Amino acid sequence: MPGVTHDDAPSLADLMPWSVAPPRLGRAWPAAPDPASLKARWNALLRAEGADREALFEPTRSRTLHSAVGQLPGLVGGTRKLARADGPCPEPVRVLAAPFDEQWLIPDQRLIDAARPELWRVADDAQIFAVDLPDSPRLPLLATSRLPLLRPGRVRPLYRRPGGAEPNLAPGLPDLLRRLGHSPDPVDFLAWTLTAVRPDLTVPLTRDPEVWARGVESGHRALWLLRRDGERPRLPGGRRPYVRAPLPARPLTLHYDRDEESLHLDEGRVSPVPPEAWDFETGGVRVLEQWFAARTAPATGAGPLAAIRPATWQQTWTSELLELITVLTLLAETAARRAELTTADPVTAAELRAAGVLPVPRWARLPATVLDHHEEGPEGQFALI
């Protein structure tokens, strides 16, 4: 952007000041691409006793079979120490395990080294999580409706309270946006941020209402694709990807034919797959390759529980793959249009300080106190929060 240095733009850390480190599992087996495997792993853990159960669990300094922890907020699960636990597996929930890779997690704090309860307290249908991707200059920020497990970036909930209450924006920022003639709606601000954010996680703000409107429109399309809610996305011109040759029961290799625009899973074939989808990377890794490996790579080095997985390719994975190809293609087009957007007449960080928007007060960087329901603590005791 001519005439504008990165120092002129405010940081995302100031504009969305409350951020949390992503949950840290500490062991691989409580997450998987399919929920049935998680239930089988849980049952295998509880069938074992004593030292065998401890070895299967894979204890760490943060979690052992004797750790006393409570339920995750808003969820139902046991709180007895795992050394004495019994009963069915807590119902797995959808999470974002890697960029564009929705998997399943056993939502039990006894299994997770650092579960970040403050994130679970505000995770509901209204919430949108913005996730930093510090090693991905092409896509430095993701947005998702799922609780994200991505590391090493920060997670920034759009709302500080459940039900879409109290936007996680710098105090005074919505009023400033109104004075500029822009929409102060938190989702509109996030849409602009997805459009304008730079690899160093600064977010230039424009005074120009027309530029703002174009950026917000582009950002809303990206939000729709990233969250995958509502109507399913389709490629224009009837270029919807299909399975042209049946996928094998256990595909081991993934190959892309650029000339034919086809994706080969061993002898199975999916097309058309535009090059934009195949070339889409985050952190220097192709998204489609990472997604495929999470479902097919041998569980080398993983513990016995992580080795419990489907024996064959799941039909639901085929549907997810076809949709992922579509999403990546359309997102690449959105990113290309974003590059054409110039932030005319920017609002600098110095001006935000002069307007009292910055510096951000300390309380805005801390989680809000959420006391809308009881949370069960260790061994069935009510937790005080």
Image (tube, rainbow, N blue to C red):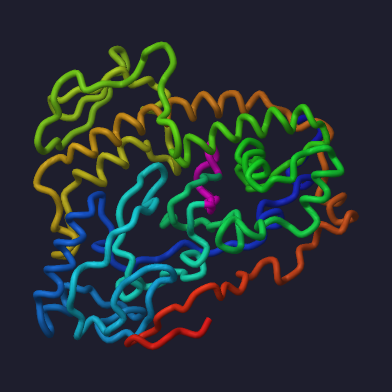
* Residue drawn at the location 73% of the way across and 43% of the way down: 6
Quadrant of res 289: top left
- Lateral position of residue 155 relative to residue 258, left or right: right
Q: Is residue 135 magenta?
A: yes
* Residue drawn at the location 46% of the way across and 69% of the way down: 116
- Lateral position of residue 184 relative to residue 61, left or right: right
* Residue drawn at the location 9% of the way across and 47% of the way down: 311
x%, y% of residue 199? 60, 43
x%, y% of residue 376? 40, 80
Residue lying furthest right = 354
Q: Quadrant of the N terminus?
A: top right
Quadrant of res 303: bottom left
- Lateral position of residue 258 relative to residue 156, left or right: left
Foreground of the two, 28 or 220: 220
* Residue drawn at the location 75% of the way across and 40% of the way down: 183
Dominant secondary structure (helix, strand or loop) of the stretch shown in magenta: loop
Q: Is residue 164 above or below residue 21?
A: above
x%, y% of residue 225? 47, 35
Foreground of the two, 231 or 80: 231
Residue lying furthest front = 373
Quadrant of res 198: top right
Q: Is residue 44 above or below residue 280?
A: below
Q: Is residue 204 above or below residue 233?
A: below
Q: Is residue 317 magenta?
A: no
Q: How many marks?
A: 0
x%, y% of residue 245? 15, 20
Q: Write down the region rendered in magenta.
A: 126-140
